[in-house]
Amino acid sequence: MTGTLAKVATLATGFGLTGSLAVAEGSYHGYESPRYNVEARIETAELRAYAPHTLAEVTVRGDQDRALSRGFSVLAKYIFGGNRSQAKVAMTSPVTQAPRQKIAMTTPVTQSGDGSLWTVTFMMPAEFTLDTLPVPENDAIRFRTTDPERRITLQFSGRATTARLDQKAAELAGIARRNDVAIDPAPLYAFYDDPFTLPWNRRNEVSYRLR
């Protein structure tokens, strides 16, 4: 065991732990959500081990807020029957968003926002596999099953403005750096509640995949 995994084991031993701190129930306010174990806590962050799960995702162009809204609309239309079988798929939580590297285009395109690319995802209910999911009408929607992975995660409430997301991503990167936890550079944002939830009751998260 080397690198980050060794660091996790060292932290767990330091806290007197012999196993995972907690096992997530795989639900949030009645919505199915990804299952994970909390392996250790570092300052205000958690080291989590996630089980595989299937995602529907779409990549959209724009600033963070507009991209999230557009991506959500595309995926919501799919689960509410915008597929070839007109089947409805249960809503899950959270909605996640991650930046993608800009792609050079060979023809002119109309850009909105700052031209950044973002991938917005919905987790698909566990009852479905890649072979049994309804075929989307929108060809921009892709599906994939994640590998087991470990992430360092910071949870926070309030409005998920771009400035606040950047602040929390930097805060979490600092926690990882101070504790010698090696991370991939791209943050993943997760939003568990609808826009009508009072800001102080919202569950937002930022995470980085461990190397």
Image (tube, rainbow, N blue to C red):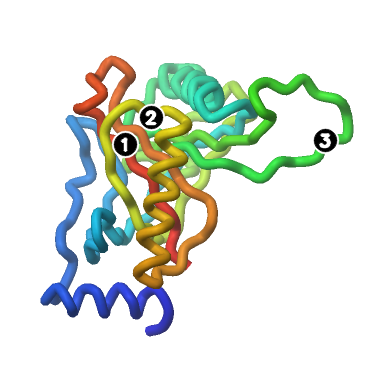
* Residue 44 rendering spot, x and y as whole percentages: 24, 54
Q: Quadrant of residue 48?
A: bottom left
Residue type beneath disc 1 = Asn
Measured in 3D between alpha carbons, the distance from the residue under mark 2 to the one under mark 3, in whole angstroms, is: 30 Å
* Residue under pointer 2: 160
Measured in 3D between alpha carbons, the distance from the residue under mark 1 to the one under mark 2, in whole angstroms, is: 7 Å
Outermost residue to the right? 107
* Residue under pointer 3: 105
Whether residue 78 is visible to the viewer of this picture, yes or no, is no
* Residue 186 rendering spot, x and y as whole percentages: 53, 51
Residue type beneath disc 2 = Ala
Q: Nearer the viewer, mark 3 or mark 1?
A: 1
Q: Is residue 76 above or below residue 142?
A: above
Q: Along the line of sight, which residue is nearer the eye, 85 or 183?
A: 183
Measured in 3D between alpha carbons, the distance from the residue under mark 3 to the one under mark 1, in whole angstroms, is: 33 Å
* Residue 201 rendering spot, x and y as whole percentages: 20, 27
* Residue under pointer 1: 204
Q: What residue sits 34% from the left and 80% below the top?
A: 6
Q: Quadrant of the N terminus?
A: bottom left
